[in-house]
C-alpha cells in the first residue's frame, strides 16, 4: 500500500519488493531515490518487516508511485464502502481470468515471452488483490493494519504535546 501525506509517500516494504521484481519488465524509469532505498544491498524484505513502510520525499518518487496502479492507494480505498471494495476485488479477479483465458484461446505456437508477460500481469494483479483484501479485512475488523508511526494518532498527540510544551516554556521566559 501507499499513503500520500505531507509531500511524502509511504510505501509498504512488500510493495517495494514487488517493484523490484516487476522492474525487470517495467518500462518506465525508476527514480534514483527509489533505487537507492530499495535496490541497495542493505534493503531486505522479511516476514518481520514486510508490513513496515519506507518513506520517499523526492517529487520524482512521488509521481512514480502515483502512476503505479498495482500498489493500492490506502486513503482512496479505505474511504470506499465494503461493497465498493468487493466490486474492485471482483473486477481484479475478472481481469486475471481474462488474461488466462485469452492466453489459452490463442491458436498456434505461443512465444515464451507471451507467457512471461501474462504471468507478470497476473502476479501484479494478485498483489493488488491481496492488498484490497487486507483493507477489506481491516474494515470488517478481522485485521489491524499498521500505519507508519508518523501517521498515527500517537505521533500527532506527541507532536501537539511537544508544541504545547515549547509554547509554555517560551512564555515563561
Image (cartoon, helix red, strand yellow):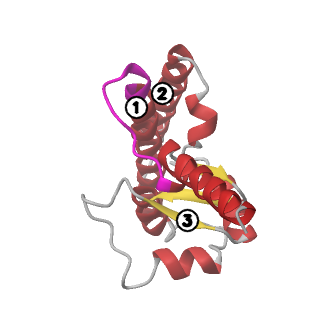
Nearer-N-terminus badge (3/1): 3
Q: Position of residue 89 (x, y in %)?
A: 48, 27
Is 99 placed above or below 159 here? Answer: above
The secondary element bearing badge 3 is classed as: strand
Marks 3 and 2, how far apart at CA: 27 Å
| Circle 2/circle 1 CB separation < 8 Å | yes
Is 32 placed above or below 61 here? Answer: below
What is the crowding at mark 3: few (fewer than 14 residues within 10 Å), some, or many (at least 20)? some
The magenta-colored residue range is 137-149
Q: What residue is at 48 percent from the left and 23 percent from the top?
A: 90
The secondary element bearing badge 2 is classed as: helix
Marks 3 and 1, how far apart at CA: 23 Å
Along the horizontal axis of the image, is 76 left or right of 17?
Answer: right
Q: Of helix, strand and loop, which mostly describes the magenta segment? A: loop
Q: What residue is at 33 percent from the left and 73 percent from the top?
A: 44
Q: What residue is at 52 percent from the left and 67 percent from the top?
A: 25
According to the picture, the residue beneath numbered tag 1 turns out to be 133
According to the picture, the residue beneath numbered tag 2 turns out to be 89
Which of 149/39 is in front? 149
Q: What residue is at 51 percent from the left and 69 percent from the top?
A: 23
Which of 65/104 is in front? 65
The secondary element bearing badge 1 is classed as: helix
According to the picture, the residue beneath numbered tag 3 turns out to be 55
Q: Is 81 a magenta residue?
A: no
Of the numbered discs in the image, which one, if any, rests on residue 99? none
Q: Is 142 a magenta residue?
A: yes
Residue 60 visible to an observer of this rendering: yes
Nearer-N-terminus badge (3/2): 3
Q: Position of residue 78 (x, y in %)?
A: 56, 30
Nearer-N-terminus badge (2/1): 2
Amino acid at each position: 500500500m501507499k499513503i500520500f501525506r505531507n509531500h511524502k509517500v509511504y510505501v509498504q516494504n512488500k510493495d517495494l519488493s514487488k517493484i523490484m521484481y516487476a522492474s525487470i519488465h517495467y518500462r518506465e524509469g525508476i527514480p534514483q531515490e527509489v533505487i537507492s532505498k530499495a535496490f541497495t544491498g542493505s534493503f531486505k524484505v522479511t516476514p518481520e518487516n514486510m508490513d513496515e513502510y519506507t518513506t520517499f520525499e523526492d517529487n520524482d518518487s512521488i509521481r512514480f508511485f502515483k502512476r503505479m496502479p498495482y500498489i493500492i492507494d490506502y486513503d482512496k480505498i479505505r474511504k470506499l464502502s465494503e461493497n465498493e471494495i468487493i466490486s474492485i476485488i471482483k473486477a481484479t479477479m475478472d481481469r486475471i481470468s481474462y488474461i488466462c483465458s485469452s492466453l489459452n484461446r490463442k491458436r498456434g505456437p505461443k512465444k515464451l515471452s507471451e507467457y512471461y508477460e501474462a504471468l507478470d500481469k497476473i502476479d501484479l494483479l494478485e498483489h493488488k488483490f491481496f492488498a484490497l483484501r487486507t483493507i477489506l479485512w481491516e474494515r470488517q475488523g478481522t485485521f489491524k493494519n499498521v500505519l507508519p508511526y508518523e501517521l498515527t494518532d500517537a505521533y500527532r498527540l506527541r507532536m501537539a504535546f511537544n508544541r504545547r510544551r515549547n509554547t509554555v516554556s517560551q512564555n515563561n521566559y
